[in-house]
Image (cartoon, helix red, strand yellow):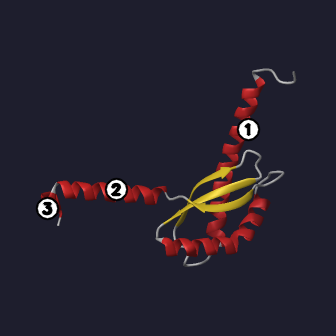
Amino acid sequence: MPYSSYCIPHIIFMSLRRILKVNKLIKQEVGKILQDEIDDPRFGFVTIIKVDTSPNLEHAKVFLSFIGGEEKEREIKDIILEHRPEIQRRLNRTLEMKNVPLLDFGFDYSVRHADHIERLIKQVKDEKNPTRKIKSN
């Protein structure tokens, strides 16, 4: 039996700790690269919300958030796809890892969903109390 029962949870904890550390490092470095690399007025204000790295450290998904609608999302996707090879190259040079995870980009819609829920709650409150609506105008 190569591992004691103590070692297995310890190995899992160390793996999780490493992934969390890699997530944080990728988030920081990609943020710097996006600031330096993308000089496009269409890009606007984009925030990295989180990074999820696969357990084998081969892939990392970078979740972005932005202000704007579907058209803005398409523009940002196009810009990211255009600059993705250079972002990956710079990350490969910056991180001191044997194998740097391959980046993929996606969007985090949690802020948009929260805003939508807030508007729905306000709408229900206004419908229940029409005098409140008049007072706010």
The x and y percentages for residue 112 are 44, 60
Question: In what element is the residue under mark 2?
Answer: helix
CA neighbours of label 2 inside 10 A, class few (<14), some (14 to 19), many (20+):
few
| Mark 1 lies on residue | 15
Label 3 sits on residue: 135
Q: Residue at x 63, y 67 (%)?
A: 34
Question: Residue under circle 2?
Answer: 118
Q: Residue at x 15, y 59 (%)?
A: 130
The kind of residue tagged 2 is Glu
Q: Are marks 1 and 3 in contact (CB under 8 Å)?
A: no
Residue 119's image quarter? bottom left
Please state which amino acid type lies under the numbered disc 3.
Lys
Q: Position of residue 132 (x, y in %)?
A: 15, 58
Q: Would residue 89 be visible to someone looking at this image?
A: yes
Labels 1 and 2: the sequence-earlier one: 1
The image quadrant of residue 125 is bottom left
Q: Residue drawn at (70%, 44%), measured in percent from left and top?
A: 19
What is the secondary structure assignment of the residue under circle 3?
Answer: helix
Rounded to the nearest angstrom, the CA distance separating label 1 from label 2 is 38 Å
Relative side of 99 to 14, left or right? right
Sequence-first tag of 2 and 3: 2
Placement of 100 over or under 75, stated as above or below: above
Residue 48 pos. (x, y %) = 58, 59
Q: Three-letter amino acid code at disc 1?
A: Ser
Location of the C terminus by quadrant is bottom left
Give the spatial CA distance, label 2 vs label 3.
Answer: 19 Å
Furthest residue in direction bottom, as rendered = 41
